Amino acid sequence: MIKLNKVTEDEDTFTIAVAGKGGTGKTTISGLIIRELVERQAGSVLAIDADPNANLNELLGFDVDGTIGELEAEVLRENQDIPPGMTKKRWMELHLQQILSEGKGKDLLVMGRGEGPNCYCAVNNILREYLNNLARNYDFLVMDNEAGMEHLSRRTTAGIDTLLIASDSNPIAVKSARRIAELVDELDIEVGKKYLVLNRTEGDLPDKTEKKVDELDLELLGEVPRDENVRDLCWEGKPIDLLDPNSPALKSVRKMVDDLVSYSVTISPVKSE
Ligand SMILES: Nc1ncnc2c1ncn2[C@@H]1O[C@H](COP(=O)(O)OP(=O)(O)OP(=O)(O)O)[C@@H](O)[C@H]1O
Ligand SMILES: [Mg+2]
């Protein structure tokens, strides 16, 4: 039985969102977490690629049949392809089901490019309702966000239990992690706990980086070392499932998942003679 360090009150889904400056490793970290959750059969996983330049699908080994952004564009188009008599809501719901990629232990939904402020009301409400209902079917939701966090700002997803802010060990990047944390606070989304994750680290952290990390009001969940297996996998366009199980990056993400998801062991009572 799994006991979760759950902090938001919503449903039973444990939501992990990964944010951070461009190129800091959000997609890689999301992919590694998803692989780990699936491998340890922690529960069903819904992956959400909330980056318009979606590439989480490649890392997870999914072909994508469409994005939410494409559906929005269709609904907002003047001469829509929506059959007469069918409401936009119904049409959207039908197509949302079709663009959900289904896999072993994990499914994927790709947000794609958003349609700007026009889309923020009616379509956003349909999306919010659909996503919240969909999320209830899963034990975990792992969301790979774009640097600008447009998806989070549209608040189509309910609360986030754990927000991981990725940074590399460059002190300037660490400083920008603070700005991201502040931005999330301003968005007025319910966030349980925020952590910093340092990616592509090499040996001990430089003093300057340590100092910046200490100054942040963020707990350091862990460090993911620079790992050439990860780099090669990405260059070869191979899915994360093919990553060597002994890869240093995967090993460190395993520890982080241990900290986020703790197992409670049921001890059978000792029988008396
Ligand atoms: N720990 C690591 N070791 C080696 N290479 C890594 C590591 N983490 C990420 N990379 C590589 O760094 C590059 C950027 O990583 P990734 O795409 O995960 O970043 P991102 O934050 O999602 O980028 P973007 O902002 O463009 O979405 C990729 O080529 C990836 O393979
Ligand atoms: Mg990315």
Image (cartoon, rainbow, N blue to C red):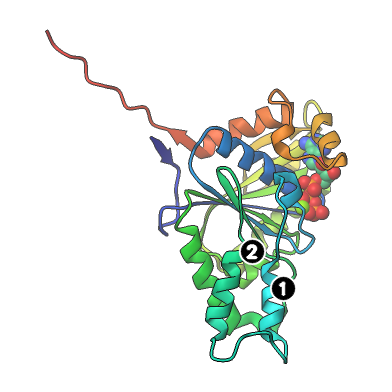
| Mark 2: amino acid | Ile
Which one is earlier in the sequence, the residue at label 1 or at label 2? 1
- Whether residue 169 is visible here, answered yes or no, is no
Residue 242 location (% of width, % of height):
73, 33
User: Which residue, given by chain and number where applicable, does mark 1 sit on?
Assistant: 70
Looking at the picture, does residue 126 appear above or below residue 272?
below
* Dot in front, 1 or 2: 2
Residue 251 location (% of width, % of height):
66, 27
Q: Residue furthest right?
A: 235
Q: Residue furthest top?
A: 273
114 sits to left or right of 270: right
Quadrant in the picture for the C terminus: top left
122 sits to left or right of 208: left
Q: Which mark is residue 227?
A: none
Quadrant in the picture for the N terminus: top left
User: Which residue, given by chain and number where applicable, does mark 2 sit on?
Assistant: 99
The picture quadrant where one finds residue 213 is top right
- From the viewer's side, name the closer residue of 166 and 241: 241
Disc 2 packing (10 Å; few <14; some 14–19; many ≥20): some
Picture residue at 68% right of the left edge, 65% below the top = 111
Looking at the picture, does residue 53 appear above or below residue 252?
below
Mark 1–mark 2 CB contact (< 8 Å) = yes
Picture residue at 74% right of the left edge, 36% below the top = 210
The picture quadrant where one finds residue 252 is top right
Secondary structure of residue under mark 1:
helix
| Mark 1: amino acid | Glu
Picture residue at 54% right of the left edge, 86% below the top = 86
Secondary structure of residue under mark 2:
loop
Residue 37 location (% of width, % of height):
56, 38
* Mark 1–mark 2 distance (CA, rounded to whole Å): 10 Å
